[in-house]
Image (tube, grey):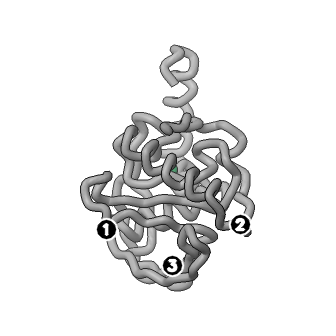
Amino acid sequence: MILTIVKYPEPVLEQPGEPVTEFNAELRKLVADMFETTYASQGIGLAAPQVGVSKRITVVDLSMGKDPKQKLVLINPEIILSEGRQYEEEGCLSFPDIREKVVRAAKVRIRAQDERGKWFEMDGEELLARAFQHEIDHLDGIVFLFRMSALKRSLNLRKIRKMQNEGTW
Ligand code: NI
């Protein structure tokens, strides 16, 4: 089922998600729906708050549905190591038509649970490292607008307000 993606400034996007404690069929259904929603929007990742669910769940798939081995489910994820720096363009499904360069660590190691509750660790570099940091930020109630420079943030906020006024946001 394709879920509705909420747009900034929906308050749920700025609330920290609750930890997941039950790894049941309901959770697995939500995860499946989140993948379906990500693919329908041609995204590479989605966090539960973006579909209005304030929980620490995110899905990432750099292949956009083409390679099942690249489907990653991160539940209660944390970044346990980060190093280096990258400055590349990002987008977010809750900010349609906005793309901006954001500073991120070049490499990260994450620790997370899978949809059965099993803990694992994984390293990511470049785009994958960016996706991990962007999605884990969502679970902490941080949207990428707040990772931009103050100038870019205000320019993008103005652009959003203009689109809101025109009814195109
Ligand atoms: Ni996002």
Does dot 2 land on a helix, a strand or a loop?
A: loop
Kindly report the distance in space between the C-alpha atoms of the residues bearing marks 1 and 3. 18 Å
Residue where numbered disc 3 is placed: 110
Residue type at tag 3 = Ile
Residue where numbered disc 1 is placed: 69
At 54% across and 72% down in the image, what residue appears?
114
Outermost residue toward the top in this view: 166
At 48% across and 45% down in the image, what residue appears?
152
Q: In which quarter of the image is residue 26?
A: bottom right
Residue 22 - label: 2
Mark 1 beta carbon near ligand 1 (under 8 Å): no
111 relative to 64, above or below: below
Residue type at tag 2 = Glu
Q: Which of marks 2 and 3 is nearer the N terminus?
A: 2
Q: Position of residue 157 (x, y in %)?
A: 56, 36
Residue type at tag 1 = Lys
Residue 100 visible in the picture: no
In-front residue for pair 162/96: 96
Marks 1 and 3 in Cβ contact (< 8 Å): no
How many residues crowd mark 3 within 10 Å: few (<14), some (14–19), many (20+)?
Answer: many
Q: Position of residue 144 (x, y in %)?
A: 53, 52
Does dot 3 land on a helix, a strand or a loop?
A: strand
